Amino acid sequence: MPADTRDALKALVRAEIESALPTLIGLSDWMYHNPELGRQEYQASAKIVDIIEEYGATVTKNIAGMETAFVAALPGQKPGPKIGIIAEYDALPEVGQGCGHNLIATAALGAAMGLARIGNRLPGSVVLLGTPAEESAVPNAGGKIHMIRDGRFEGIDATIMIHPMTYDRIDYDSSLVAKGLELSFHGKSAHAAANPEDGINALDALIVTFSSVGLLRQQIRDDARIHGIITHGGTAPNVIPNLTKARFRIRAADITYADQLFHRVIACAQAGALATGCTLEWEEYMPAYLNMVPNRALGKLFANNLEHIGRNVSAAPAKTGSGSTDLGNVSHHVPSICAYLEICGTEASWHSTAVADATITAKGHQAIVDGAVSMALTAIDFLFDDDARAAIKSEFEHAQRFTGDV
């Protein structure tokens, strides 16, 4: 296709997104004021679906065993390449939209709205993927993993998404593998003053476990992280607890080492049970998040469009830490990339109310439009540029030889 014609389509899409900004900003701010935890994003998911259906999308809802998951096929679906635009919309306990998923959702929606207007003129197709529960705040999180297992990423040639951050950046770094472990200790209740000798203290077992994990941290690799919380510590101070529970997240740069640490934490819990006379039950309460395998060729398309609209992704600071995301699992199946867009400075600690508050500022709102426009333009380039798609596919296949399909 001639470049001027592609540029004309880009101009149409950009105009459509900008005209929809009141709707997008209104929805994002609504999500800030009405945060919903993972797998419970009933209202946010429904609002997104209602809007994209107005643009002629064919939406499949309640998929992969998740009521708030959906796949929206935009108008103009035809044989040829297919690109997926990913939306996340879950919030965190206590801090609400402290990871800015309201911006991720509305930027993805905006890109889909713009592309829906030119769907019949695209040499391929676009899908909007509604992926619940990216945060590990609820059991059986990792909506993208469940959708992979349900075949919802089959036939998609690439996926893109944005994420708010304290800087602009195309994320070419990997992420950490993350596994979730839930522990339950069973003891025996007794009066803590009258007859403590008759009790078996399940909280003691948990304290031994946390102490052991604390010592274990001294002997692990720099790329690994272990962190946990007590989810049930007892019922009353004068009753020896007969049941306690905790959850841990175990992270590492690769799945092999993460598995090793996962079982070492279980060993710490077994030691706590043995020392106190309790019994232990454990389970992996969510599927493992795999490390991200970013696709640089796809990132180049994305970066070009971000630079075109004024985002300087080449001036990002060096990355000093890493989290985990179920987009990592997607990147093992489909060429994928994520762009970070600045909404606040480093004074805001991530996963905090300060970040949530930043999503309703002018910079937060600008991230919606810039994210929507850049993703839509990148989708157009991907569908029209045969050479770029070939480079993206070649890089992905090369990476697969080293990571293995999972």
Image (tube, grey):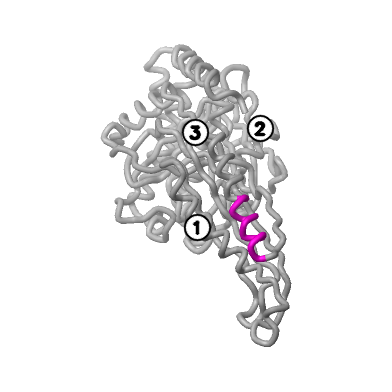
Tell me the residue that label 3 is attached to. Answer: 292
- Where 178 sits versus 279, above or below? above
Q: Nearer the viewer, residue 74 or 195?
A: 195
Task: Note whether residue 112 is visible.
Answer: yes
Residue 359 relative to residue 291: left or right: left
Tell me the residue that label 1 is attached to. Answer: 30
Image quadrant assignment for residue 162: top left
Task: Give the percent coordinates (x, y) of residue 164.
Answer: 40, 45
What amino acid type should be assigned to the residue bearing mark 2?
Arg
Task: Give the percent coordinates (x, y) of residue 124.
Answer: 56, 20
Q: Which residue is at 57% across, 36% downward?
A: 128
Q: Which residue is at 70% across, 58% downward?
A: 280
Identity of the residue furthest to the bottom in this view: 194
How far is the residue under mark 1 from the one under mark 3? Answer: 31 Å
Q: Secondary structure at mark 1?
A: helix
Point out the frontmost of discs 1 and 3.
Answer: 3
Q: Which residue is at 42% across, 20% downward?
A: 6
How far is the residue under mark 2 from the one under mark 3? Answer: 19 Å
- Where 60 sits versus 34, above or below? above
Q: Which residue is at 66% across, 71% downward?
A: 201
What amino acid type should be assigned to the residue bearing mark 3?
Met
Tell me the residue that label 2 is attached to. Answer: 152
